[in-house]
Image (tube, rainbow, N blue to C red):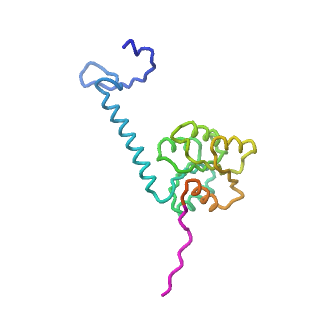
């Protein structure tokens, strides 16, 4: 079509049932309903994930931390407090988790990662409108004074120095960030009759 000739397009080819060769798959014409169905299913999946997340007791948290021992400690604390925690150890895994997982209530972000700087991840997160409102807490030992102001401008709600707090304080901060209360991890006292 000459009217659309200057617009860059992506052509997906699908073998035609007839022997006339491959036919372009596009959003108009015979295959339009397939594209619409794909979009409808993707939207339905996002809506379902949002409903399930709202019904969950605890928050859904993305932990981006490359220190395995520290990550495991936090994982145990979050599990006992009722949170749904997704752990990743690198920046690339964090980006994939954000693209493919349900929406998160809070992101706990280490800034010194092996592949992508945590502040680069923060910039990417804030550039996507669907992720722009997710509270981010930076949990790291290596934050410079200049990073504090930049992080605040990108919507970091809190900076926590790992070496100066107990893991339960990080759990409490994450729950406060999304307005939820952690389930008590203390065993209940037995009742004596």
39 left or right of 16 in image = right
Residue 69 in magenta stretch = no
Front position in the image: 89 or 103: 103
Determine whether 139 is above or below 100 in the image: below
- In this view, which residue lies farthest toward the left? 18
Q: Residue at x 45, y 20 (%)?
A: 8
The location of residue 106, given as percent across then percent down, is 56, 50
Front position in the image: 90 or 59: 59
Which secondary structure dominates the residues rendered in magenta? loop
Q: Which residues are magenta?
A: 181-193
Q: Quadrant of the N terminus?
A: top left
163 left or right of 20 in image = right
The location of residue 155, given as percent across then percent down, is 63, 44
Residue 189 in magenta stretch = yes
The image quarter containing residue 37 is: top left
Q: Residue at x 51, y 44 (%)?
A: 97
- In this view, which residue lies farthest toward the right? 145
Q: Residue at x 35, y 31 (%)?
A: 35
Determine whether 181 is above or below 120 in the image: below
Front position in the image: 103 or 117: 103
The location of residue 184, given as percent across then percent down, is 55, 68
């Amino acid at each position: 079509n000459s009217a659309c000739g200057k617009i860059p397009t992506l052509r997906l080819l699908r073998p035609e049932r007839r022997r006339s060769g491959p036919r372009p798959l596009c959003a108009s014409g015979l295959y339009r309903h397939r594209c619409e169905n794909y979009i409808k299913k993707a939207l339905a999946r996002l809506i379902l994930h949002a409903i399930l997340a709202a019904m969950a007791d605890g928050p859904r948290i993305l932990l981006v931390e490359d220190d395995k021992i520290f990550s495991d400690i936090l994982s145990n604390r979050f599990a006992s407090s009722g949170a749904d925690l997704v752990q990743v150890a690198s920046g690339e895994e964090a980006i994939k988790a954000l693209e493919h997982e349900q929406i998160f209530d809070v992101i706990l972000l280490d800034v010194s990662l092996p592949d992508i700087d945590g502040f680069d991840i923060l910039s990417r997160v804030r550039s996507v409108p669907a992720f722009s409102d997710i509270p981010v807490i930076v949990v790291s030992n290596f934050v410079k004074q200049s990073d504090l102001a930049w992080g605040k401008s990108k919507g970091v709600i809190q900076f926590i120095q790992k070496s100066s707090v107990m893991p339960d304080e990080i759990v409490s901060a994450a729950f406060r960030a999304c307005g939820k209360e952690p389930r008590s991890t203390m065993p209940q006292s037995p009742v004596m009759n």
